[in-house]
Image (cartoon, rainbow, N blue to C red):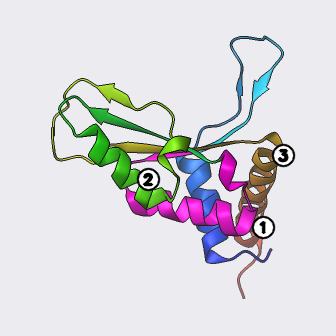
């Protein structure tokens, strides 16, 4: 398997920090296939977005972001911060979630969730993850020289 460092990092971030497929509560037989990663670290969000943009080729117009902040945090400042980090226009942000004051008011930049919904891409990412796991397991079972 030939995978770049960015691809391996992007797919690993998605598997570890991302939302997995789930049954849609509104329709019993329907499934949702979200391609999402949530994190407080701007570098994690940036790496995942670079992977989506450069390796997966997502439609920029379908990318969404949503942040969660605490009461008392500057909503406009943090929305602008994450818009600049993600290079996603504020018009493509979902409504900001404001939580009760946490343990570190004013010391957090909030949590950012990058969203992209597409079943085909979700299944592609799942296959990529399975290829990584299969490759690792195959290497572990080979006898050493």
The residue positioned 66% from the left and 60% from the top of the image is: 52
Residue pointed to by mark 1: 138
Where 113 sits versus 24, above or below?
below
Residue 28 figure quarter: top right
Q: Give the mark nearest the N terminus, 1 or 3.
A: 3
Residue pointed to by mark 2: 83
Label 1 sits on a secondary structure element that is helix
Residue 133 forms part of the magenta stretch: no
Label 3 sits on a secondary structure element that is helix
Q: CA distance from mark 2 to mark 1?
A: 41 Å
Q: Magenta span covers which residues?
A: 37-62
Disc 2 vs disc 1: which is toward the camera? Answer: 2
Q: Which disc is residue 34 wearing?
A: none
Residue 60 forms part of the magenta stretch: yes
The residue positioned 52% from the left and 42% from the top of the image is: 91
Give residue 116's position: percent from left, percent from top: 66, 44
Residue pointed to by mark 3: 120
Secondary structure, magenta segment, majority class: helix
| 40 with respect to 118 (left or right) | left
Q: Neighbour class for label 3 at 10 Å: few (<14), some, many (≥20)?
A: few
Give residue 19's position: percent from left, percent from top: 60, 38
Q: Neighbour class for label 1 at 10 Å: few (<14), some, many (≥20)?
A: few
Residue 84 figure quarter: bottom left
Disc 1 vs disc 3: which is toward the camera? Answer: 3
Give residue 95's position: percent from left, percent from top: 46, 30
The residue positioned 74% from the left and 53% from the top of the image is: 125
């Amino acid at each position: 398997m030939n995978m770049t460092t960015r691809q391996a990092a992007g797919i690993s971030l998605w598997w570890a920090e991302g939302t997995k497929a789930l049954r849609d509560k509104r329709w019993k037989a329907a499934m949702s296939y979200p391609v999402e990663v949530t994190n407080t670290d701007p570098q994690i969000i940036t790496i995942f977005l670079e992977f989506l943009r450069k390796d997966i080729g997502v439609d920029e117009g379908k990318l969404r972001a949503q942040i969660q902040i605490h009461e008392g945090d500057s909503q406009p400042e943090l929305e602008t911060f994450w818009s600049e980090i993600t290079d996603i226009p504020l018009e493509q942000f979902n409504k900001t979630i404001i939580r009760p004051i946490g343990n570190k008011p004013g010391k957090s930049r909030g949590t950012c969730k990058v969203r992209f919904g597409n079943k085909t891409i979700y299944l592609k990412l799942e296959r990529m993850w399975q290829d990584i796991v299969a490759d690792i397991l195959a290497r572990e079972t080979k006898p050493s020289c």
